[in-house]
Every structure is written in structure tokens, then in C-alpha cells.
Amino acid sequence: MNHDSEKCALEDAALGIFMKKFNEMNQNKLHLYVRNLRPDFILKDTEEKLVGLEIAHLYYDSKEAKMLLGRDNNSSHGVETINELINELNNLIVKKARKYRELELDHSIELLIRNASPIFRMNDILRFIDEIIEQYTFEHIWFISRDENNEWILIDLVKHSQ
């Protein structure tokens, strides 16, 4: 699988999880309007409002990403700490905010981050919610991660950090 098709498959999987969880929690349902380059998807809600959705995946580091994507045959990564994962999360938010800060669009932009860590779960992230960087580019920063029961959980980091 080449990089672009792998990226699309990861984005499609994240979008599927997000839309299922979002639509379970909200009366104003979202559906896919169009796949896009920037942002990754344009969604439309039941009120016909368009929303841009940029998708990112959170890995502890590039070595973990390579291992999880089958590009590194190592069976162990080494010690991982939640503080370093939170630093990576903050770096990812800053990087994505920088990408969209000056972009003029006809609709809002939201960020979806899928936690790819097999070690750290939603409860780990929530313990450090006060250390997640505030930004003003995205109306929502959606975060999906598994919980201790291996179920997907969706939260809005913007609302949780206020």
C-alpha cells in the first residue's frame, strides 16, 4: 500500500469512528459531503451547514508509528511516558493550527485527532487535560481514543479544557 492510499484508509477509518460516535451523541447529524485535500473532508449537518474536518493521528513518536503501520519489525519500543504523548499531542495541534490559521474558507474547520497509542487510553489523556494547549483556529478539536474496555470514546478537547 502506498503512502497516499494508506493515509486515505487511516482517515476513512477515523472518520467512520467519529461520525458514528458524533451522531450517537447529537441530534444534528453529520454526513459526508465530499472528500477534500484541505481539509480532508467536508461534512454537512442536518441543517445543511458545511463543516471542514482535518484528520490527524497521534503517535508517541515516529518509531511507534512505523511499528503500528508495519514498517518496523521491532517488537518493543522502549519506555513511553504520558508526558511525552501529551507533548506530541500539543505539537500536533500547533502544527495543524498553523496550517489553517490563514486559510480563508466558507465554513468552519474542526480537527479530529485519533489516538493511535496501544498503551495510553482516554482516561490517561483526561488526567492531563489542563496541559493540552489552547488554540483558536479550530472551533472544535475532537479526540477519539479507546477506553479501558477497548471502546471508542469521543470528546471535544476545546470544551473539556475550558
Image (cartoon, helix red, strand yellow):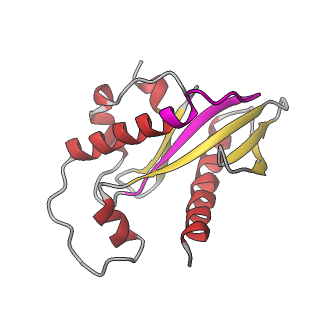
Residue 78, relative to residue 1: is it above or below? above
The residue that appears at 58% across and 25% down in the rendered structure is 139
The residue that appears at 47% across and 26% down in the rendered structure is 158
| Percent position of residue 44, x then y | 79, 38
Q: How many numbered callouts?
A: 0
Report the magenta residues as a range.
Answer: 98-116
| Percent position of residue 141, x then y | 51, 34
Find the residue positioned furthest to the top.
162
**Magenta stretch contains residue 92:** no
Q: Quadrant of the N terminus?
A: bottom right
110 on left or right of 128: right
145 on left or right of 132: right
Find the residue positioned furthest to the bottom.
73
The residue that appears at 34% across and 30% down in the rendered structure is 132
Indicate the quadrant where residue 126 lies.
top left
Q: Is residue 124 among the parts visible in the rendering?
A: no
93 on left or right of 141: left
Find the residue positioned furthest to the right.
48
| Percent position of residue 99, x then y | 53, 37
Find the residue positioned furthest to the front.
102
**Which sits in the foreground, 66 or 115?**
66
Q: Is residue 63 among the parts visible in the rendering?
A: yes
Q: Quadrant of the C terminus?
A: top left
Indicate the quadrant where residue 92 lies.
top left
| Percent position of residue 20, x then y | 64, 50
The residue that appears at 67% across and 34% down in the rendered structure is 26
